[in-house]
Image (cartoon, coloured by chain):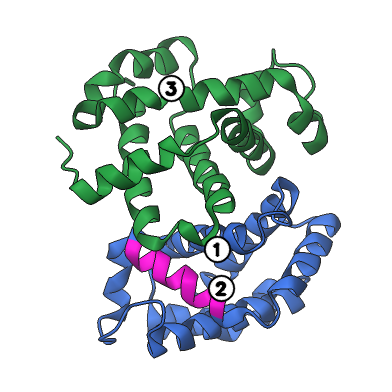
Chain colours: A blue, B green
Amino acid sequence: MSLSAKDKETVKLFWSKVAGKQEDVGSDALCRMMTVYPQTKTYFAHWNDLSSNSPYVRKHGKTVMNGIGEAVKKLDDLDGGLLALSELHAFKLRVDPTNFKILSHNILVVLAIMFPDEFTPVAHVAVDKFLQAVSKALAEKYR
Amino acid sequence: MVEWTDSERTIINGIFANLNYEDIGPKALCRCLIVYPWTQRYFGAFGNLYNADAIMANPLIAAHGTKILHGMDRALKNMDDIKNTYATLSELHSEKLHVDPDNFRLLADCLSIVIAAEMGYEFTPDMQAAWQKFLSVVVSALGRQYH
């Protein structure tokens, strides 16, 4: 399910709206993920505050969304562009790749909340494909 | 049997009470057919599904979306025994409609996103958690009679 030229254009256009809101989108998505899918909290046992305005969650939300922003810039070669991040997730973080799907869903929920008019079905399918492609690239080095 | 807290019951009933079935149902089904186009396989008799605009303008799809959402009313009224409430519906989807049960999850995800767009920040993480739990039980019950 690779990204067509139209998909890439749609993703870039939609992502320009996310610019400047990385921390809000990222921290809300992480908070929702940990509330709705509590098993994901196992990766954050070292934080004593998992609420959406926790400094840990806000900082990490920004980190994750900045990483995805980097992926938007490297749409034509995600495997190559995300190599370092893939190695990080494979060898150091060892996040089970099922969780990429879970976080992706929660990112989509936040985008729907923040951009109810712009997050049309057409934008949704392009962003969903993009997040799937990013997840695949992130899992590239796992085995 | 699934245990529901009072808070979860209140949240789920509240979401349904404020739902415009004729708006949200069609939006959820259309989004599912557009975002996961392979789901269109079950709608061969529904007319023009050629592109996103055609799907969103299709009155048969809209009617069906509303019907599906009303189908959830039964789960809402029988929250303490959704599994048995949906036994016949599950058999229908398996034996007559031949729907891959993974599709229930796909539609459920689209429904959550449509409701999130509708409710905005009122759809808090705690509300999303209760809602997701409800949908998971519905999805599981619908897949229960497959063999």
Task: List the residue tagged with mark 2.
Answer: A25
The range drawn in magenta is: A24-35
Task: Check if mark 1's residue and mark 3's residue have beta carbons within 8 Å.
Answer: no
Task: List the residue tagged with mark 3.
Answer: B71
Place of residue B111 in the rendered image (x, y in percent of width and height, measured from the top left): 52, 41
Place of residue A78 in the rendered image (x, y in percent of width and height, measured from the top left): 68, 73
Task: List the residue tagged with mark 1.
Answer: A110
For the point 41% across and 17% down, the residue is B94
Place of residue A83 in the rendered image (x, y in percent of width and height, measured from the top left): 60, 81
**Nearest the eye: B58 or A102:** B58
Task: Check the picture and name the quadrant holding the C terminus of chain B.
Answer: top left
Q: Can residue A77 be seen in this view?
A: no
The amino acid marked with disc number 3 is Gly
At numbered mark 1, what does the secondary structure look like: helix, strand or loop?
helix
Q: Would you call the spot at circle 1 few (<14 residues within 10 Å), some (14-19), or many (20 or more)?
A: many
Quarter-of-image position of residue B25: top right
**Nearest the eye: A52 or B1:** A52
In the picture shown, does residue B86 fall above or below A57? above
For the point 20% across and 27% down, the residue is B81
Task: Check if mark 1's residue and mark 2's residue have beta carbons within 8 Å.
Answer: yes
At numbered mark 3, what does the secondary structure look like: helix, strand or loop?
helix
Task: Check the picture and name the quadrant holding the N terminus of chain B.
Answer: top left
Place of residue A85 in the rendered image (x, y in percent of width and height, measured from the top left): 55, 83
The amino acid marked with disc number 2 is Val
The answer to whether tags 3 and 2 share a subunit is: no
Quarter-of-image position of residue A90: bottom left
For the point 65% across and 44% down, the residue is B35
